[in-house]
Amino acid sequence: MATSVAIFFRRFRQRFARRLLKLRDAEPGEVVLNQRRVFILPTRAGLVFGVMLVVLFIASVNYNLGLGFILTFLLAGCAVIDMHLTHRNLAQLHLSPGRTAPVFAGEEAQFELHLHNRRAHDRYAILLGFIDTDNAIEHAIDVAAHAASNVTLSASTHERGWMPAPRIRLQTRFPLGLMRAWSYWKPDLRALVYPHPEDDAPPLPLMQGEREDGRGAAGHDDFAGIRPYQAGDSPRLLAWRQIARTESSALIAKQFEGGASSELSLDFARLPRTMDVELRLSRMTRWVLMAEARGLPYAFRLDNLHFPPAVGPAHQAACLQALALHGLHAGDDGAGA
């Protein structure tokens, strides 16, 4: 019963906040903070300043102080100007999402954002930060007139898959701090979160007769000469002495005969089925990183997805993305199998 009541009040509060603050879902493309999207209220200092104005006005009336009236209305005029400047500092600001880079679960996802000021006045001390996240750090940024500024916000990741950018709050108290203007924005931006690599993963599943440099052990690997370097060759095959003698920047690799060319295969189905799915994905992630670090060409198989043997950033990114999205629906933003 208590749980049902709590859920009811939480949904009611969310709907009330969405209507009152005009909270929107993810907005693609460029967004403009028009007049209706910017809210403004006095800060604590502003409330104290208002109380002081009331006291000054009452004292001026009771004692018929002309200079008191002048001071009261002068300070009140400053407060009105401050309210206008605070609201103007945020209104009509153009926002657009930038780029994100994939990260591993447990790391900080970085979301790049662009702020465009197409007005003739500068904007100062605009604070940006994610709300409803573990990382509530706000970044201050200035945007010059007819210019743009970039800012990168971080958010903690916990699960693999697509992580949408949390809702962002922009606020400012410029210039006097008596007023606080703020607005909300949820960019149509998401970051790909790879599975967390297993910490104590076993060695790579090299088949019998294979070596860690990607060459077979049969025939004692007799040296047969040199050849141009090919993508996927192990760094151990580089002929450094011949490279140093050549004037060009082309790489040269050693060629061996008699050794059976080995193939490292990372197959999800070969892992014990008694293992948890997430643990198997973490192990595959670690093996991909280990194979890339050693320069070993590796084949990759995950259910019906199969990549031929290769090595390099593109191959690694394709394998890690397949692991990150394994078992998730096409429209899932979250993660968790």
Image (cartoon, rainbow, N blue to C red):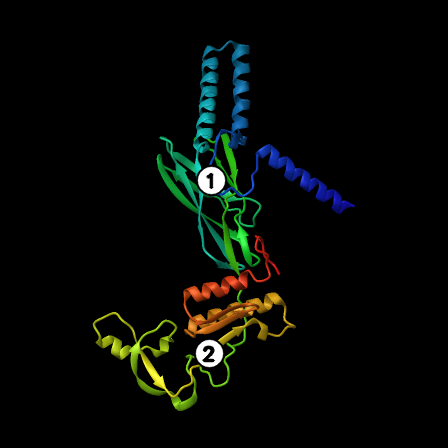
Residue 58, x across and y down, in percent: 55, 15
Of tags 1 and 2, which is closer to the observer? 2
Residue 91, x across and y down, in percent: 46, 31
Element type at mark 1 = strand
Name, please, the residue furthest toward the bottom. 219
Q: Residue sitting at 49 percent across and 11 percent down? A: 65
**Neighbours of disc 1 within 10 Å: few (<14), some (14-19), many (20+):** some
Task: Please tell me in which quadrant of the rendered image residue 261 appears.
Answer: bottom left
Name, please, the residue furthest toward the top. 64
Which of the pair 54/205 is nearer the observer? 205
Amino acid type, callout 1? Leu
**Neighbours of disc 2 within 10 Å: few (<14), some (14-19), many (20+):** many
Task: Please tell me in which quadrant of the rendered image residue 176 appears.
Answer: top left
Asked if residue 195 can be seen in this view, the reply is no
Residue 225, x across and y down, in percent: 29, 84
Which of the pair 163/82 is nearer the observer? 163
Pointer 1 residue: 127
Which of the pair 209/142 is nearer the observer? 209
Name, please, the residue furthest toward the front. 304
Q: Residue sitting at 61 percent across and 34 percent down? A: 19
Q: Residue sitting at 35 percent across and 79 percent down? A: 237
Amino acid type, callout 2? Glu
Name the quadrant of the C terminus.
Answer: bottom right
Measure the C-alpha gap from mark 1 to mark 2.
53 Å
Q: Is 146 on the left or on the right of 134, as rendered?
A: left
- Dot placed on the residue nearer the N-terminal end, 1 or 2: 1
Is 114 located above or below residue 196 in the figure?
Answer: above
Pointer 2 residue: 263
Q: Is 121 on the left or on the right of 7, as rendered?
A: left
Is 272 located above or below residue 15 in the figure?
Answer: below
Is 172 located above or below residue 327 in the figure?
Answer: above
